[in-house]
Image (cartoon, rainbow, N blue to C red):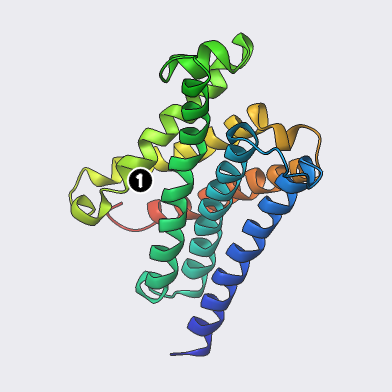
């Protein structure tokens, strides 16, 4: 293993650990670290924060990897491990909310969320989150279909879904409304756009792309 690969792996794991810690700290401070009577309504936001933070890390690490000219295979363990955490988190984030709404007698999703949880003016933001979830779940099929010619459209959809989730979070995230974490989230948004710009400029600058 070369030093470049080693330090890229260190960077990837360190960045991911730091962003997860920031997500937990931001969520916990929003609750004033009082967990005596915590419910699913209080718990579900942290999973959304963690999921987006780790997916953002994937983009940043990808940019650094491409810049250094390192093959993706050298990050296989990192990508698979953090992707598993993301998968659990994107299920838990809406799942806990919808389960609690159902228990409280508000019916089944998506109606329980759109009609009984978010204000009418924010329903579009909620729908962005739902659509993005479907895209991210479709992306999990990459293990079987990533070699197909049409798979590139799933990649494009995933990139768009990331931007949609950023907007979803900034509009609906209670932790992001009046917290220092909002500034971090805005930083994620700006750097995500820069990362996508770099990735696509490299992709379409190649012959035949």
Q: Nearer the viewer, residue 91 or 54?
A: 91
Question: Quick check: can you spot residue 196?
Answer: yes
Query: Is the residue 168 above or below the residue 158 in the image?
Result: above
Residue at point 51% right, 19% down? 113
The percent coordinates of residue 176 (x first, y second) are 72, 37
Q: Is residue 135 above or below residue 193?
A: above
- Between 169 and 116, the one nearer to me in the picture: 116
From this viewpoint, is residue 147 visible? no
Judged left or right of residue 73, residue 99 is right
Image coords of residue 154 (percent x, y): 31, 41
**Number of marks:** 1
Left or right, residue 75 beside residue 8: left
Q: Residue at x 56, y 23 (%)?
A: 125
Residue farthest along the front direction in this orientation: 36
Q: Is residue 40 left or right of residue 204?
A: right
Q: State the residue at coordinates (51%, 74%).
A: 68
Q: Is residue 108 above or below residue 39?
A: above
Identify the secondary structure beneath mark 1.
helix
Q: Quarter of the image holding residue 72?
A: bottom left
Q: Image quadrant for the N terminus?
A: bottom left
The residue at 42%/35% (across/down) is 133
The percent coordinates of residue 121 (x first, y second) are: 63, 11
Q: On the image, numbered disc 1 is attached to which residue?
A: 155
């Amino acid at each position: 293993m070369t030093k470049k690969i080693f330090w890229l792996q260190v960077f990837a794991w360190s960045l991911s650990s730091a962003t997860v810690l920031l997500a937990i700290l931001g969520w916990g401070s929003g609750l004033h670290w009082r967990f005596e009577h915590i419910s699913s309504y209080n718990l579900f936001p942290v999973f959304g924060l963690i999921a987006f933070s780790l997916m953002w890390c994937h983009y940043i690490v990808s940019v650094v990897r491409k810049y250094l000219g390192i093959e993706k295979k050298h990050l296989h363990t990192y990508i698979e491990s953090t992707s598993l955490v993301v998968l659990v988190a994107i299920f838990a984030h809406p799942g806990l909310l919808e389960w609690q709404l159902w228990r409280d007698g508000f019916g089944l999703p998506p109606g329980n969320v759109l009609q009984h949880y978010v204000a009418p003016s924010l329903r579009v933001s909620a729908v962005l989150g739902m659509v993005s979830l479907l895209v991210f779940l479709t992306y999990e099929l990459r293990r079987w279909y990533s070699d197909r010619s049409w798979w590139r459209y799933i990649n494009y959809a995933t990139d768009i879904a990331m931007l949609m989730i950023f907007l979803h979070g900034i509009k609906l995230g209670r932790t992001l409304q009046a917290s220092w974490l909002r500034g971090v989230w805005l930083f994620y948004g700006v750097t995500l756009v820069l990362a996508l710009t770099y990735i696509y400029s490299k992709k379409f600058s190649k012959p035949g792309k």
